[in-house]
Amino acid sequence: MALDVVDQSATAGSDAVGNPSPIRRLLRPLLRWEGGLALVLVISVVGGSLLSPEFLTASNIFNLQLSIGEIAIMALPLTLIIISGEIDLSVASTLGLSSSVLGYLWLHHWSMGLIIIVVLALGALLGLFNGLLVTRLGLPSLAVTIGTLTLYSGIALIVLGSTIVSNFPLSYTNIGVNSVPGVDLSYSMLIFFILAILAAVLAHYTSFGRSIYAIGSSPEAAAYAGIRVKRVKTILFVLSGVVCALAGILFTFRLSTAEYNNGSGLELNAVSISLLAGVSIFGGRGTIVGVVLSVATLGVIQNALLLTSFPQQAMGVVIGGLLLVSVFVPNISLLRNYLRSRRLRSNAALVDDAGSNG
Amino acid sequence: MTADHNADDFKAVALSLQHARKYFGAVHALEDATITLRKGEAHALVGENGAGKSTLVKILAGVHVPDSGVLEIRGQQIRLNSTREAIAAGVAVIYQEPTLFPDLSIAENVFMERQPTRRFGRIDYPTMERSVEEILAQLGIKLDPRRLCLGLSIAEQQIVEIAKALSLKAEIVIMDEPTAALSSAEVDRLLAVIESLKRSNVAIMFISHRLEEVYRICKRVTVMRDGRYVLSDATSNVSQDQLVRAMVGRDLEIRSATSDAPTGAEMLKVEHLTEEGVFSDVSFSVRAGEVVALAGLVGAGRTEVATAIFGIRRYDFGAVTVGGKRLRRGAPLEAMRSGIGLVPEDRRQQGLVMEMSIARNVGLGSMKKLSHFGLLNSGRENSLAQEWGARLQLKYGRIGDSVETLSGGNQQKVVLAKWLARSPKVLIVDEPTRGIDVGTKAEVHRLILELARQGVAVLVISSELPEVLALADRIVVMREGRLVREFARKDATEELIVEAATVSGGVAA
């Protein structure tokens, strides 16, 4: 459509408003959340290596990867869900139920290939259940997934009872504890990196990803732009279910154990990763790069504290404090805006005074 | 003509506001508001949407402080800096939709924050309930003060607010369109309550679009238009005709661009569209190249019809057809694919994702077009936004700036760009110029006419009659969820439209 309703004499565009100085433009990426996080990561690595000679050894770094692998994997789809303005607290229960079903089917002599397919499908189903409750019934995801957190781990207990399945063949459990040939990388970390790349492409370079951000920022405006809000959210929950089931499989192989309470409590670690990654709990903001940095930072700090003689009881204090800071810092700019608007308002009130008393 | 020296001016002045002015940035909400309320009298305030009535109410309620002007209450000059100060000065405001605490009783709501107490701070329920019972009896209303407010009708909720006003010893009660959401029996009851308020020597300001009510209970009437008072007189001195003319008032603007009567194919066809309790049996069509305006009061169901056409709302019966293809209910994406665009009423909530950049907001409607092998091409997104920004003369810093940084008019241009980039066959614009400056307004008008000239079928919803008359080839008027009149542009006048939109028993289309 050729539309030229307005004359072009007044040029619109880039020269209308003054650009910030080049220095500020250079500094801007550092001022972003991810920049700060990278800085914290570097400091933690340096600190860790100073505090403990063991820290930078290959075996320690490998252990670090093992300890955080599954949680990191679960944090990826969780991050997308949080960006869309929802939350999934059933991730660890999905992991646990997947692990239990894996153990149960193995006890019943199913082939591992088939079991993996069934478990992944089960994960999709569990996610779909969350998604439908949230989108079709319009229930808040916080409440829904607190419910399914308990429900799914309850089902896991029914499935496996007090049985502990641990007769998995080495060919599988080796995946859990050995490194990828040629690199000091655990399989869980390899899978995390692959999924992170996929998630980053999905979130930042596809219309689906753009829809996630739009929904998280303003579900109403997203719907008015033709975005199928319910569908996008349902897909995200299904993705989360599948990925958590995958994490469940890895978790089982790593510990060589399928138990009904596998992974219980890990949902909070996954949420912590997302928050530290700078993802807004209100939706609409966050990056996958942030998640990768956040995984590394949390892993390094936890690991470094383990290596030193730091009292383990106080670990929670450090991680919790870090989280509070990560929630607080992004809001500093909001605080600044608030203060500025208050100042403007009080100036306006002065003008009011001058006006109405005249 | 303030009619200050009429014979029946013996009643004492309760409140007088002289020459109040209130600007919000570039928006001149109120230029010159002047009104005098007298004890024991109901005074009507009428005017079109956007005439400044709400701003006036907010000034009296202590929400806004006027930029200039003199407010006197009981002869004392006063300045209301907060709602608290307004209440202390004896001013109570009853809004169209009261906000009570649903889980508390009527008595508790009336005495919120100032419950009578007994020893040790215990709330004195018997005293509280007795006092509310007395007030309700005085108003001639049977309601149990112990009843929870949950489930009270809007009319009953208003009564509770009035009871609260009386228990606060309010001498000035302002009612902002209290009857808009009431059934006729409820209106009768409310008007009876107003009569009893008058007998208690309360001064009442009554805002309503329904002129019959104004004549029934108000002794005086003030008309506002474009933020100014234009007439203030005894209702017995003004005919309904005169009132309507005063509300509409200004010289009719000549249509900015005259187009021949469009003869294009029927692009949008709406048949018997009905959503129970919201709108019913709405049928009309828009041809290619035609601008049809949906006129009516706020709350007449126009926006609801528009969002039902677009698929955001579901409807119960009826059909929407675009270019011969019938649309599924509740499927905005399908509506968009068949060629509909909707510039919604609420720009900030519905039209834009405020945190996102200009480019992303423009691209949000065209993501499929901007994708290549499933990947969004942000370079193309930027150039699309820049292209439309230039065509619509958008004033912005960088295309990556968030739309929050733009002025209202420029934000609206971003919304328009989002839809125009899709080359729509049918464009619905809901209050396209609300809250934007005069210059941009004219640009938007020109744009709409230009689109029609290029064969787009345009449906305009507007509460501003000059805008309706400037743009529309045809005007359909809605009242209370129904289409009541249809005018060709040459037959339409502001008076006729206002009459069709306000007077019950108007001729059915």
Image (spheres, coloured by chain):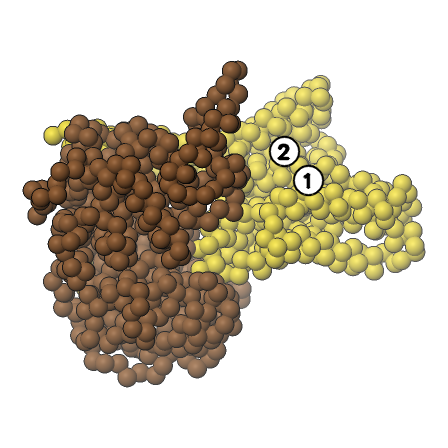
Q: Is residue B354 visible?
A: no
Q: Residue at x 50, y 72 (%)?
A: B317
Q: Amino acid at mark 2?
A: Leu
Chain identifier of the residue bearing label 2 in the image: A
Q: Up-down: is A270 above or below B305? A: above
Query: Which quadrant is home to the C terminus of chain B?
Result: bottom left
* Percent position of residue A9, x then y: 17, 60
Residue A221 x %, y %: 44, 55
Identify by letter the chain in yellow: A
Taking B487 as reference, is B167 left or right? right
Mark 1, other Cα within 10 Å: few <14 / some 14–19 / many ≥20: many
Q: Which residue is mark 1?
A: A267
At label 1, which amino acid type do we have? Answer: Glu
Give the residue at mark 2: A298
Q: Residue at the location (29% across, 31% down)?
A: B90
Q: Work out which residue is located at the far top of the displayed protein and give it.
A: B120
Relative to residue A142, is residue A215 depicted above or below?
below
Residue B232: percent from left, percent from top: 14, 48
Towards the viewer: A202 or A321: A321
Between B361 and B305, the one lying in front of the other is B305
Colour chain B appears in: brown
